[in-house]
Amino acid sequence: MSFEAGGFALFSSVVDESTLEELRAEFTRLHSGGTAGVRNVLEQSPLIASLANSEALVRHLPASGLKPVRSLLFDKTPEANWPVAWHQDRTITVKDRHEVDGYSPWTFKNQIHHVEPPAELLAKMVTLRIHLDDGGPENGPLSIVPGSHCQGKIPPDHIAGLADANATVITCVAGDVFMMRPLLLHSSRRAAKPGHRRVIHLEFADPEILEQPLSWAEWGG
């Protein structure tokens, strides 16, 4: 199944072991533990910002000119072993709030403005998830519904039935990169054997795609 049809792709052994060790140490520096993750990572970590713009990652993107515009860290530990219900990633982060047609609703979390843009914009974005640990069936791996991104924004009352009938579990090993469209339905269960499931989550877009005067919160171009 192609990336455009399925909405996902898995690339093996993208990040080498020495770089993984550096990233794990950086993850520990940024993430104090006890919470699900960290937002706005590009501004806090030159190492992760360099990774986000590296040829090792950029060559896997489906189009040229895409830049990292949002970054998060996720981990599952005994202290933060959280389930994530089926959903689509439907928000972006911007520097300031401006009322623009098609951009709604707005929220304000961790001192950052979040807004839901038109589905057409989300359809042009792509997410890379860099795995720092092995992600087997017992530590809360990602589940997806292949092709669900093609349906645009799916009404909440349609999600459960669609997901239950078509779910696929994605297992990874450390160094793998999982690529997906934000509108791809996805979820994850609690880890049966929680240890670490550290993931660097990077979202990419054309920096010029936003309606003016909106601007990305994290892109520094």
Image (cartoon, helix red, strand yellow):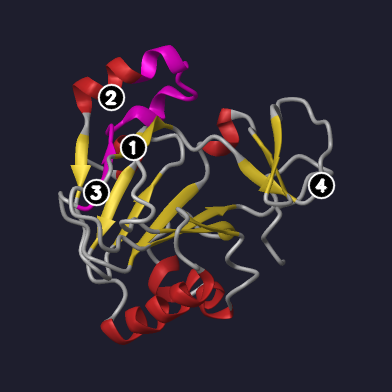
Q: CA distance from mark 1 to mark 4?
A: 29 Å
**Which numbered mark, 3 or 2, is in the foreground of this view?**
3
The amino acid type found where label 2 is placed reads Ala
Q: CA distance from mark 3 to mark 1?
A: 12 Å
Q: CA distance from mark 4 to mark 3?
A: 37 Å
- Decide if residue 97 is on the left or right side of residue 18: right
Specify the label residue 96 is tagged with.
Answer: 4
**Residue at mark 3:** 191
Mark 4 touching mark 2, by CB under 8 A? no
Q: Is 56 located above or below residue 177 in the figure? A: below
- Residue extending farthest to the left is 137
**Residue at mark 1:** 187
Q: Earlier in the sequence, mark 1 or mark 2?
A: 2
- Decide if residue 167 is on the left or right side of residue 23: left
Q: Earlier in the sequence, mark 4 or mark 2?
A: 4
- Residue at 28%, 24% in the rendered image: 163
The amino acid type found where label 3 is placed reads Ala
Instruction: Give, as a single range, the part of the protein colored magenta.
Output: 139-159
The amino acid type found where label 4 is placed reads Asp
**Residue at mark 2:** 163
Mark 3 touching mark 2, by CB under 8 A? no
Residue 75 placement (x, y as % from top left): 38, 58
Determine whether the residue tagged by mark 2 lies in a helix, strand or loop.
helix
The amino acid type found where label 1 is placed reads Ser
Determine whether the residue tagged by mark 4 lies in a helix, strand or loop.
loop
Magenta stretch containing residue 141, yes or no? yes
Mark 1 touching mark 2, by CB under 8 A? yes
Residue 28 placement (x, y as % from top left): 44, 75
Dot 2: within a 10 Å radius of its alpha carbon, few (fewer than 14), some, or many (20 or more) residues?
many
